């Protein structure tokens, strides 16, 4: 039952996403909606290609979890119906976004973020010891997905504020952009320190690099994004080296 629900939920999510991307919902594409409410944390267009990576990884997960050999694996119980919930929230969010209901869409995005955090913690990603195949087919998809939705949540809130003509919450658009970039970096460093999650960190570096490119005209924001990406990269390298050193000592 759960395996079938995961397959159906993913398939519907993928179909709705394609419809949104091709402007079949609301008569406007997802990217065009984003362009209507540009913020100083909006990354360059190419950055959104990460959705292709996310859906490929989720497809791998859906196929893997449906295999007979995986029938009694603990990850089924740990994920439970949270993946189905995340798909439902994703679908509703897409409709709200396409019809430019940005403020309401924040709540769906937060719900999606919450469901992915639940999956991430229940799988104990970065701490639990699982076979390499399971790490690639189950843990990796949700690390990348959560990393991007962390960025998307920040972008969604920022776009909603622009739609209400209160971008920056009174502290100015540039200061708001720098603030949320710093928050994103702190979250990533915490994930690195506690989970050693390389995939999550790479997603944030990808997003920050995209912000740096898109916001090149605003030196403050571009520099904040660049420095932040470098800080995460340094943390990432340090984590990898320390992990290898620890293994050598063992």
Image (spheres, rainbow, N blue to C red):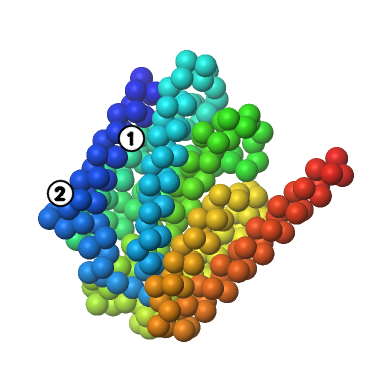
Residue neighbourhood size for the residue with mark 1, other residues' Cα within 10 Å, grouped as few (<14), some (14–19), many (≥20): many
Label 2, secondary structure: give it: loop
The reply to whether residue 52 is visible in this rendering is yes
Residue 187 vs 140, above or below: the answer is: below
The reply to whether residue 110 is visible in this rendering is no
| Residue 117: percent from left, percent from top | 48, 46
Furthest residue in direction front, as rendered: 46
Q: Quadrant of the N terminus?
A: top left
State which tag comes first along the sequence, 1 or 2.
1
- With 79 as the anchor, is 9 left or right in this view? left
Q: Residue at x 44, y 72 (%)?
A: 213
Label 1, secondary structure: give it: helix
* CB contact under 8 Å: marks 1 and 2: no
| The label number, if any, that marks residue 10 in the structure image | 1
| The label number, if any, that marks residue 24 in the structure image | 2
Q: Residue at x 58, y 41 (%)?
A: 125
Residue neighbourhood size for the residue with mark 2, other residues' Cα within 10 Å, grouped as few (<14), some (14–19), many (≥20): some
Q: Residue at x 15, y 50 (%)?
A: 25
Residue 15 vs 144, above or below: the answer is: above
Q: Quadrant of the C terminus?
A: top right
| Residue 227: percent from left, percent from top | 57, 74
CA gap between label 1 and label 2 equals 19 Å
Could you say which quadrant of the image residue 155 lies in?
bottom left
Residue 217 vs 199, above or below: the answer is: below
């Amino acid at each position: 039952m759960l395996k079938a629900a995961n397959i159906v939920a993913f398939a519907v999510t993928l179909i709705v996403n394609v419809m949104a991307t091709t402007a079949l919902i609301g008569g406007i594409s997802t990217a065009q909606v984003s362009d209507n409410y540009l913020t100083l944390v909006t990354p360059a267009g190419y950055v959104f290609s990460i959705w292709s990576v996310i859906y490929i990884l989720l497809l791998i997960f859906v196929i893997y979890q449906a295999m007979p050999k995986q029938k009694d694996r603990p990850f089924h119980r740990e994920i439970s119906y949270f993946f189905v919930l995340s798909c439902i929230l994703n679908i509703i969010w897409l409709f709200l976004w396409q019809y430019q209901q940005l403020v309401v869409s924040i709540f769906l995005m937060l719900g999606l973020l919450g469901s992915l955090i639940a999956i991430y913690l229940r799988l104990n990603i970065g701490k639990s010891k699982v076979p390499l195949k399971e790490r690639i087919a189950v843990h990796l998809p949700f690390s990348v997905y959560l990393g991007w939705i962390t960025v998307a949540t920040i972008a969604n809130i920022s776009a909603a504020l622009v739609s209400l003509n209160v971008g920056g919450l009174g502290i100015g658009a540039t200061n708001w952009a720098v603030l949320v970039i710093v928050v994103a970096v702190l979250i990533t460093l915490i994930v690195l320190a506690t989970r050693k999650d390389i995939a999550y960190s790479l997603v944030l570096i990808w997003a920050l690099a995209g912000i740096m490119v898109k916001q090149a005209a605003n030196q403050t924001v571009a520099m904040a994004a660049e420095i932040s990406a470098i800080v995460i990269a340094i943390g990432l390298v340090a984590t990898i080296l320390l992990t290898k050193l620890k293994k050598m000592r063992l």
